[in-house]
Amino acid sequence: MSSELRLVWVYPDLLSTYGDRGNLLILARRAAARGLDVERVEVRADRPVPAGGDVYLLGGGEDGAQAHAAERLLADGGLGRAVDRGAVVFAVCAGYQLLGASFVAKGARRAGLGLLDAHSDRGPRRAVGELAGEVDAELDLPTPTGLEDHGGRTHLGLDARPLAKITLGTGNDGQTEGAWHGTVLGTYAHGPALARNPRLADLLLRWATGEALAPLDDAWPDRLRAERRTAARLTRRR
Ligand code: GLN
């Protein structure tokens, strides 16, 4: 069925901190509001990742869960096959780090999936608080906002473009936040990110469907964004 959209939430039992599952709910809701027939699939870590999804979502996680998730995903191979088919991936924090070539967790360097040209190490201190930036002009999105909470730092190679230049918070390394390449996009923003940044949700849907989407009444998300921007301004002044 051409209108069907399969959303795959990868490893809810390992990667789902700070309400990141909300990204799945927002995406499903915004797709359904455009008349798309949406199917939601939640894949626990003891199950194979189905190759036939349109959008794969990964959330944040503690270091141990993150290391375990990366091992399972590497052994499974389904996410890489889906990306080769052109599927969309949206990953947050631990999920974002494990898309890179490698990351550090529990004192050891671990292999990532190599789906983004990036590697992560540890920063001098945990980055916690409001996150904001100026997004890559090519993506044509308003200022992204989110909540970050991570010990890792991410360094991008030439094949990954930063999602945004940091105006508040730490993100990848104090300069940039997140990364994207093709239809794979990672960010440090919890929030959940797609509730705070509905136009980012719509960008993922456009990548997945190849169709321009009718605008929605975004009064509620706009209020949330305004509230979080105020919180960010107050943080900055402290
Ligand atoms: N374990 C990772 C870190 O601390 C990611 C944390 C998270 O997903 N919130 O950098």
Image (cartoon, grey):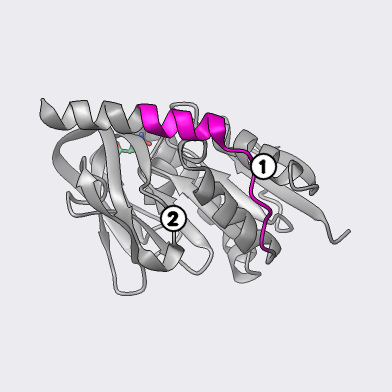
Q: Between 33 and 64, which is closer to the camera in this rendering?
A: 33
* Image side of residue 177 versus residue 89, left or right: left
| Residue positioned 63% across, 53% down in the render | 55
| Residue positioned 51% across, 33% down in the render | 221
Eyeballing the image, is 13 above or below 85?
above
Give the CA distance from mark 2 to mark 1: 17 Å
| Residue positioned 19% across, 51% down in the render | 173
Part of the protein shown in magenta: 212-227
| Residue positioned 44% across, 61% down in the render | 140
Residue with the mark numbered 2: 141
The N terminus, quarter of image:
bottom right
On residue 30, the disc is 1
Question: Few, some or many C-alpha atoms within 10 Å of disc 1 (few <14, some 14-19, many ≥20)?
Answer: some
Residue 219 coordinates in the image, percent (x, y): 55, 33
Query: Can you see residue 28?
Result: yes
Residue 61 coordinates in the image, percent (x, y): 42, 34
The reply to whether the magenta stretch includes residue 222 is yes
Eyeballing the image, is 36 above or below 119?
above
Query: Is there a contact, CB below 8 Å, between mark 2 and mark 1?
Result: no
Please state which amino acid type lies under the numbered disc 2. Answer: Leu
Give the quarter of the image for residue 60: top left
